[in-house]
Amino acid sequence: MYYPIKQAVDLELGQDPDKNSFLYKNPPPPSVFFPCFPIDSLSLSLSLSLSLSLCEEQARVTPKMPTNLELPDCHLLKPPILITPSSPTPHHALSLSNLDDQKFLRFSIKYLYLFRKSVPSESLKASLAKALVDYYPLAGRLRSAGNTDSCSGGDDDQRLEVDCNGEGAVFAEASMDITVEEFLGLSCWPNRSWRKLLYKVEAHSFLGVPPLVVQVTNLRCGGMILCTAISHCLCDGIGTSQFLHAWAHLSATPSAPLPVLPFHCRHVLRPQSPVHANPAHPAYTRSAPSRNDKTAALPADVHRYLQSQPLVPVSVTFTTSLILRLKRRCVPSLKCTTFEALAAHTWRSWARSLADHSSSSSSPLTPLHAVKLLFSVNVRDRLDPKLPRGYYGNGFVLGCAPAAVRDLVGNNLASAVKLVQAAKSRVDGDYARSTVETLEDKAARTDLSASLVISQWSNLGLEDVDFGEGKAAFMGPLTSDVYCLFLPVAEEPHAVRVLVSMPECVAEKFEFHMKGFVEREEKNGNGNAYGGEGDGLCCEDV
């Protein structure tokens, strides 16, 4: 008789199959079921070895979600203060580039660092004051430049600039009755209770929020949580990492000069004059999509659907070995980077879960819908001339890979990787300049209607920030959103944690698709299950 591995192991151990297990209550599709073996000593030994090694790795990288994710109360020790530059700084208006001034970026990037040993707050404040001498725009305030585009009105369409007035960054100190280890047990699932770890500045609009807000929260065990909110209009991921390293450097070695000095001016990204007429940019839209073209894939509004649903964070960690197993599914026909393989895999899993009509009667995708993958590409070295060293403004553009759901899901992983590679290869200096010129029109908006947006934090050096008492035991975002993040993993330099918020009704399905390739690989007995042929996922499967 033949049994799936899990049942075979239960029978050999003299146990009944676990009827409370997730797999028993939610059996996976036949194509991803555990491999079956005859019950004999040799096959059982092999089955037991494969099953246990798989379960151990998955348990290690994706721990079980605790029943209570709420953090205890956070107590402010004193009213927040403003940290001003320790020396006089230039007072002027800093114009932002078109890449900085996108509506898509009018928010703050919120980082959370968990350190096992706290750094004295006076040291943090003194080093921050020094860092703000060089990074003085972060001590200023955003304001409207008063240049409203003639083709559209309203405050939202006004260009922004930084009033470099030295007003200062917000700095708050707090305490929380929790330990580092206790927080690590909750760290995979950001939730609303985490927001108490960052002081909220009451403001009528985004312009009223200072470009830099910091809160240091001391923990019961002597550790600390450091949260920062840095305006995305001033810095991209590379720029924020550069600033945080500068601040940490001055905290750890106060008398040492900065290894990299910031470059402030944004004129290097001005559009050509006169602005050239560009064809439609794939990552942007100026109006609602047309439904007149009957031959094109149907448009969808997944973004609106996601915003209307209760969302839960899904966190899946890919260790070095899992990443290699994922990449092997594309060889020998195709070589790819970690980002290309993981982005393609995440995109397909996202589309499959949202197009699965068994999860919801109102699924936003069908096989005929068109979807896009948007991902940030650093263009500092792709422009001619290159952006100056130390440029910390937004120096990225969005790569765009389009596909119909039926093609994305119906073809194998290698096909999706090729779409990502093609999108990356299109991002050259001309593409970057085209983006800058497209954004000269303030009616241009990032096309989020049916797009998965991926931002890669895992190669920015964010996890290496050290204020003098060692690197962080954990770093990640303060909140989870529908925008997908590829995050670094502390003490595992080549691992990547994928974090994205999904509708509650499809979250388990998405997580299952993200992990499912391991079971399929075990079933096929090798790491190249999808290398050449399709993976058997037809339109009927979604």
Image: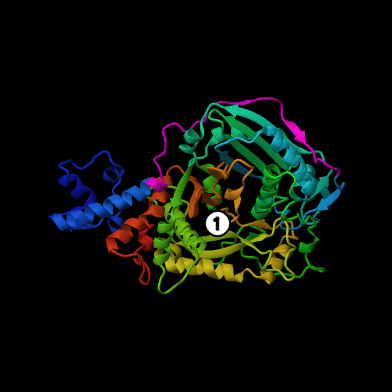
**Number of labelled discs?**
1
Picture residue at 52% right of the left edge, 39% below the top? 190
Picture residue at 42% right of the left edge, 56% below the top? 352
Picture residue at 50% right of the left edge, 49% below the top? 491
Q: Indicate left or right for 36 with 136 as reference.
A: left
Q: How is the image coloured?
A: rainbow
Q: Quadrant of residue 396?
A: bottom right
Q: Tell me which segment is drawn in magenta.
A: 60-88
Residue 70 versus residue 172: which sits nearer the camera? 172
Position of residue 458 relative to residue 503, above or below, is below
**Does the stretch in magenta take in 16?**
no
Residue 296 in view = no
Residue 95 versus residue 137: which sits nearer the camera? 137
Disc 1 crowd, CA 10 A, few/some/many (<14, 14-19, 20+): many
Residue 71 versus residue 347: which sits nearer the camera? 71
Q: Position of residue 416 (x, y in %)?
A: 47, 66
Q: Find numbered disc 1 in the image and state the secondary structure of the residue it sits on.
A: strand
Q: Position of residue 412 (x, y in %)?
A: 40, 66
* Residue at the spot of label 1: 451
Residue 266 in view = yes
Q: Quadrant of the N terminus?
A: bottom left
Q: Residue furthest bottom?
A: 333
Q: Position of residue 9 (x, y in %)?
A: 20, 48
**Does the stretch in magenta take in 78?**
yes
Q: Quadrant of the C terminus?
A: bottom left
Q: Quadrant of residue 328?
A: bottom left
Which amino acid, by three-letter code, is at mark 1?
Ser
Q: Main secondary structure of the magenta part?
A: loop
Position of residue 379 relative to residue 318, above or below, is below
Q: Position of residue 422 (x, y in %)?
A: 54, 70
Position of residue 389 relative to residue 7, above or below, is below
Picture residue at 67% right of the left edge, 56% below the top? 445
